[in-house]
Amino acid sequence: GAGVSQSPSNKVTEKGKDVELRCDPISGHTALYWYRQRLGQGLEFLIYFQGNSAPDKSGLPSDRFSAERTGESVSTLTIQRTQQEDSAVYLCASSLKAGGITDTQYFGPGTRLTVL
Amino acid sequence: AQSVSQHNHHVILSEAASLELGCNYSYGGTVNLFWYVQYPGQHLQLLLKYFSGDPLVKGIKGFEAEFIKSKFSFNLRKPSVQWSDTAEYFCAVSNSGGYNKLIFGAGTRLAVHP
């Protein structure tokens, strides 16, 4: 099982509830990315982690969104007070290191979030 | 700001037909270019990538793409498609000077009929 894994695969929640999405990157990958894919659209960058550096949060759409990563392992994306427009597939990707010819991102299967 | 445009949202072909999917990007600096594919029920995977050197890049499963800097384009081609190529194809770009935050196009759904 060397790929990126994400959980849950599907999440249905009520508007206003908080949700937490999890990503397990490939072992040894120092860079981790979160993207969002709304229906019929391409992926939108949300946040990026590289080792112990400060994350790039420039893609987070609002302060209801936050993410954490423990060292070079698991990351969690939290959405507080969910809204219907948050419904999307949330994808996680990891790469060996950021930048350069080796930086191919490997994607997980995604979490499909539905906010009722 | 960087952006990626994929001209065709849906393409329908018969087996053995030739394929070309358009991709244009807007960015003034040096870029890295990617095509990702998502087969039905599977997750996104890399088809091919361009970082530097030969602008004609060959990827898996007989796909290739050509980087034309003057046209800001990175079109994907395959001379003869198969039913198994039915998938969604995404073009993406990143700034080669920094980390690879990918900017994606909206995707093209390809359906290949036997």
Image (cartoon, coloured by chain):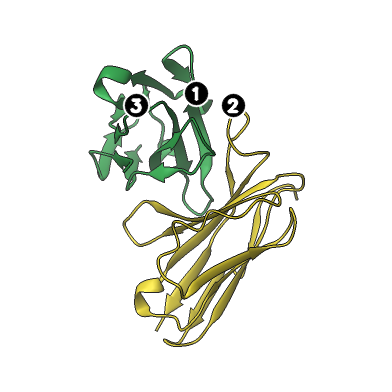
Dot in front, 3 or 1: 1
Q: Farthest residue toward the front?
A: A54
Q: Chain of mark 2?
A: A
Identify which amino acid the numbered label 3 is placed on. Phe
Q: Are marks 3 and 1 on the same chain?
A: yes
Q: Position of residue A110 (x, y in %)?
A: 54, 60
Q: Chain of mark 3?
A: B
Q: Say if B96 sits above or below A3 in the image.
A: above
Q: Say if A93 sits above or below B96 in the image.
A: below
Q: Position of residue B38 (x, y in %)?
A: 47, 46
Give the green chain's letter.
Answer: B
Identify which amino acid the numbered label 1 is placed on. Phe
Q: Position of residue A59 (x, y in %)?
A: 44, 57
- Give the residue at x 46% y 19%: B57
Q: Secondary structure at mark 3?
A: strand
Which label number is shown at residue B51?
A: 1
Is the C terminus of chain A in the top left, top right, bottom left or bottom right quadrant?
A: bottom left
In 3D space, how far apart are the residues under numbered discs 2 and 1 (Cα atoms)? 7 Å
Give the yellow chain's letter.
Answer: A
The residue carrying mark 3 is: B74
